[in-house]
């Protein structure tokens, strides 16, 4: 046991846990006001259901000794997860740190299906998804599974977290279908300051996400910390220049998105590449995600908050560039293409493809099975009124004295009233 490592991992675990509420603000600001609470609750609820699923079964399937595909049940119900050392920190602390990753990965998916998925079906989905999808992929890469054996590099979750969540988000958005107003009405962010706040706190928490993945207070943690600072800076600069060239304006939402894309891209590489390489990686990552968002807006795909473009494309680019920039001089591990190991790119690509296929297929199966028992989609009337009132009986922004106290009777009267418009309070 090393007390410095324990202290750093306690802090890192808290930082990563903070990222899920930060994601709630980031996502919540991007939607219309009538769905702000529902969208934020899709992140907050993951702290409970995904976290408990992780403790009961997910952690064991990810990290208990097992096969190359999945862990055993030895750690189920946290049996054997004690104060004994896991490396230089208590086993129970390692479990908690990894649990914060499972929580935010499940929450990331919500960005693709906000404003239209029933809350009960969503809770059921993310609970099962953590066990059936996230845990096995985490085992492949971090738990001694087949990708780890092949030498796949994923320092803090480019494949395990971002590509995984984006594949699930893409399938979920297709299965559930687009919002009723998609393609017919401009659905603008209702609170851009929330978006900036969420991006800033996400960046703060991401230092625990990446530097904490060193699992020690050591030089690699310092390297990951510096790279987590520098890569999004490079992305933000390039994204800003792209905005100026294309539109002549620099938008706040674009800047916040750029920061997130840079953070996503550096995640798999944070402890493997040099600081200068991290700036190059972040700068390169801006291009595909920027144009992926533009392309998606011209299609019928309603990936509401562009989870695929930010996390899927950003995570894929970051994972592939890890195979380019990996440098054993900095990490003590293997080299990438620049260091003479071109084969590393192939290994990285295989890991990406495996995560995309497994996550996408299992997400489709889970949603179809849940749909046999629970309706996945909100009714047209509920969607038009907004899911804050219909799913939660609350409003993000009260209109008059006592407007926030919405009881079942009032909800029923609202639902029974003729639909005048899709925006509550506007003709």
Image: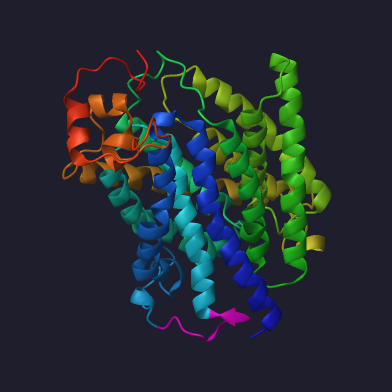
Magenta stretch, residue numbers: 80-90
Q: Nearer the viewer, residue 423 or 303?
A: 423
Colouring scheme applied when the structure was drawn: rainbow
Q: Nearer the viewer, residue 325 or 176?
A: 176
Residue displayed at 60% across by 72% down: 10
Q: Is residue 294 left or right of residue 173?
A: right
Q: Residue 146: give x, y in percent of width and height.
A: 49, 62
Residue displayed at 62% across by 49% down: 201
Q: Residue 135: give x, y in percent of width and height.
A: 42, 61
The C terminus lies in which quarter of the figure?
Answer: top left
Residue displayed at 52% across by 27% down: 189
Q: Residue 286: give x, y in percent of width and height.
A: 68, 33
Q: Is residue 373 visible?
A: yes
Q: Nearer the viewer, residue 233 or 147?
A: 233
Q: Quadrant of residue 40?
A: top left
Number of residue marks: 0
- Residue 120 belongs to the span the image colors magenta: no
Q: Residue 74: give x, y in percent of width and height.
A: 37, 78
- Residue 81 belongs to the span the image colors magenta: yes
The N terminus lies in which quarter of the figure?
Answer: bottom right
Q: Is residue 365 visible?
A: no
Q: Is residue 384 left or right of residue 67?
A: left
Q: Nearer the viewer, residue 155 or 20?
A: 20
Residue displayed at 61% across by 49% down: 202
Q: Is the residue 179 above or below the residue 347 in the image?
A: above
Q: Is the residue 351 above or below the residue 423 in the image?
A: below
- Please name the predominant secondary structure of the magenta segment in the image: loop
């Amino acid at each position: 046991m090393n007390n410095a490592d324990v202290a750093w991992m306690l802090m890192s675990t808290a930082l990563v846990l903070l990222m899920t509420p930060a994601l709630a603000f980031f996502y919540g600001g991007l939607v219309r006001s009538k769905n702000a609470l529902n969208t934020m609750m899709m992140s907050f609820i993951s702290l409970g259901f995904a976290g408990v699923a992780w403790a009961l079964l997910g952690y064991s399937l990810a990290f208990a000794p097992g096969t190359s595909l999945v862990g055993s049940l030895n750690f189920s119900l946290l049996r054997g997860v004690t104060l004994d050392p896991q490396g230089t920190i208590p086993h129970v602390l390692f479990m908690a740190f990894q649990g914060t990753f499972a929580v935010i990965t499940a929450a990331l998916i919500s960005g693709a299906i906000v404003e239209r998925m029933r809350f009960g079906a969503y809770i059921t989905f993310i609970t099962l998804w953590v066990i059936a999808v996230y845990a096995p992929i985490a085992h492949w890469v971090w738990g001694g599974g087949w990708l780890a054996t092949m030498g796949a590099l994923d320092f803090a979750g480019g494949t395990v977290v971002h590509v995984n969540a984006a594949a699930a988000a893409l399938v979920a958005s297709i299965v559930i279908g687009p919002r009723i107003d998609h393609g017919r009405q401009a659905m603008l962010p209702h609170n851009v300051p929330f978006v900036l706040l969420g991006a800033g706190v996400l960046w703060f928490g991401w230092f625990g996400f990446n530097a904490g993945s060193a699992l020690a207070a050591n030089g690699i943690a310092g390297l990951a910390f510096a790279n987590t600072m520098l890569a999004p800076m490079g992305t933000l600069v390039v994204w800003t220049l792209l905005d100026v060239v294309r539109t002549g304006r620099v938008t706040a939402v674009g800047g916040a998105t750029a920061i997130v894309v840079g953070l996503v891209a550096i995640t798999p590489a944070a402890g493997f590449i040099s600081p200068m390489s991290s700036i190059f990686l972040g700068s390169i990552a801006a291009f595909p995600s920027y144009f992926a968002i533009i392309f998606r807006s011209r299609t019928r795909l309603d990936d509401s908050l562009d989870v695929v473009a930010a996390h899927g494309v950003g995570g894929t680019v970051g994972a592939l560039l890890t195979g380019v920039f990996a440098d054993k001089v900095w990490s003590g591990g293997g080299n990438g293409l620049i260091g003479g190991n071109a084969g590393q790119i192939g290994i990285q690509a295989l890991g990406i493809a495996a995560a995309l296929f497994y996550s996408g297929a299992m997400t489709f199966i889970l949603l179809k099975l849940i749909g046999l028992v629970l309706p996945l989609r909100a009714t047209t009337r509920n969607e038009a009124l907004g899911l804050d009132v219909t799913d939660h009986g609350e409003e993000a922004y009260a209109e008059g004295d006592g407007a926030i106290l919405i009881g079942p009777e009032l909800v029923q009267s609202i639902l029974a009233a003729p639909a005048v418009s899709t925006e509550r309070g506007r003709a």
